Image: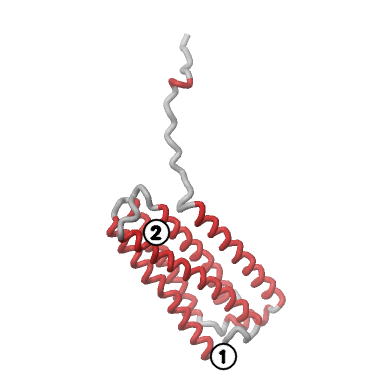
Amino acid sequence: MIANPTIDQLPASPPDTRRVPGNKGIWAGITCEFVEFAVLFAVYFIARAHFPDAFHAGAHRLSIAAGTAITLLMITSSYFIACSVNAIRQDRQRAAVIWLVGGLVIALGYPLTKALEISWNLAQGINGESGIFFTVYYYLTFTHLVHATWGILGILWVLARLVFGGYSSHDYAGLEALACYWHATDIIWLAIFPMFYVLA
């Protein structure tokens, strides 16, 4: 008769290496960010349902080139930051620094492009009092710009720590948390862009 192995004799199961990227604090912040924009998106759709003609006409007055440029800047900077995380996981600190510097430079193009877009809008007589579409447009895009500015400040802080050896393949939660926040901000812009520049 074959004896069944006891619990002590069973092979040990491999350790569970799954984990939430970043840290709990950044995910609390990302959740708050998503809730905030969910409310703003609700305002957008309610206003659009009540004033469809204003939203249709307003979209044609915006610079789709500026909106497209911001979209490309957000996506590219997200890619560079993800490459920085991948590099530090392999203990390639120099590569991680280079990728993160690239991500920072590209990310700085967002507020610059936004400033040029606003200047162009004002030259065309488009301000927050130009109608319900532009009121919602400015409120949503300015709020997103504020979140992106926080992200840029986060990139500067994480870059400073990375340059001085603050992260390694064994401890890179701060860099990963930054990437999570920037990706979340990127995702929100990918919703804002078609809502104002394309579908309206």
Rendered image quadrant of residue 75: bottom left
The mark nearer the N terminus, 1 or 2, is 2
Measured Cα–Cα span from mark 1 to mark 2: 39 Å
User: Residue 99's spot in the image, x, y percent?
Assistant: 33, 63
Quadrant occupied by the C terminus: bottom right
The residue where tag 2 is placed is 82
Give x and y (percent) for residue 164: 30, 59
| Image mark for residue 125 | 1
Q: Amino acid at mark 2?
A: Ala
Residue at 47% across, 46% down: 19
Residue 26 position in % (x across, y down): 50, 57
User: Where in the figure is residue 131, as x and y percent of width and height?
Assistant: 65, 84
What secondary structure is marked by label 2? helix
Horizontal arrangement in the rendering, residue 27 relative to residue 107 (left or right): right
177 in relation to 111, above or below: above
- Give, as a three-letter code, the residue at label 1: Gly
The residue at the point 45 percent across, 38 percent down is 16
Disc 1 residue crowd, few under 14, some 14–19, many 20+, Cα 10 Å: few
How many marks on residues? 2
> Residue placed at 43% from the left, 64% from the top?
154
